[in-house]
Amino acid sequence: MERQILYPMLALFALTFAVLVMTGRARFKAGFARRVKASDFRYGESANVPPDVALPNRNLMNLLETPMLFYVVCLALYVTRTVDTVAVYLAWGYFALRLGHSAIHLTYNNVYHRLSVFAASNALLAILWLRWALAITR
């Protein structure tokens, strides 16, 4: 059962890597079209970077923020041998919501829809942490 918690982590890694590739592709495409210069990225992204080029990078940053807490809690569950079926379902739910968040962000980008999915993913993340904390205090 413990190994099952690793699969949603791998799925989230794959999503993160796919968005990383999208970010590079958008930047190079804009560079070759002379829509941006290398200096536009000297300190991150300047105001000169068009929104369609900046958006994949912003989504990548989202995938490197709170998901770090997801990786940590999944590894904590694994190492302490406190993985159960509920934790695995919560982890897959978290991944699905993060996938939904990225899909919304990278397509039609409705802020209210994106916020709803983001909030739901954070609720699942908090539940995972709470369940792990309770499991190790028994």
Image (cartoon, helix red, strand yellow):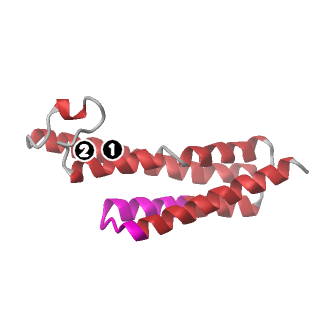
The residue sitting at the right extreme is 138
**Magenta residues?**
95-112
Say what secondary structure mark 2 lies in: helix
Quarter of the image with the N terminus in it: bottom right
Q: Is residue 39 visible?
A: yes
- Provide residue 37's location: percent of width, then percent of height: 14, 34
- Provide residue 16's location: percent of width, then percent of height: 44, 47
| Image-based side of 128 in relation to 112, left or right | right
Q: Amino acid at mark 1?
A: Val
Say what secondary structure mark 1 lies in: helix
| Image-based side of 72 in relation to 109, left or right | right
Instruction: Measure the alpha-carbon separation of dots 1 and 2.
Output: 6 Å
* Circle number at residue 21: 1
Residue 134: within the magenta?
no
* Circle number at residue 101: none
- Badge 1, how many Cα within 10 Å: few under 14, some, many 20+? some
Q: Identify the residue at horizontal 15%, vertical 44% (top origin).
A: 30
Circles 1 and 2: CB distance less than 8 Å? yes
* Magenta part, dominant SS: helix
Q: In front: 134, or 92?
A: 134
The residue pinned by badge 2 equals 25
| Image-based side of 118 in relation to 103, left or right | right
- Provide residue 99's location: percent of width, then percent of height: 46, 60
Q: In front: 97, or 1?
A: 97
The image quadrant that residue 126 belongs to is bottom right
- Badge 2, how many Cα within 10 Å: few under 14, some, many 20+? some
| Image-based side of 52 in relation to 79, left or right | left
Q: Identify the residue at horizontal 70%, vertical 49% (top origin).
A: 3
Residue 101: within the magenta?
yes
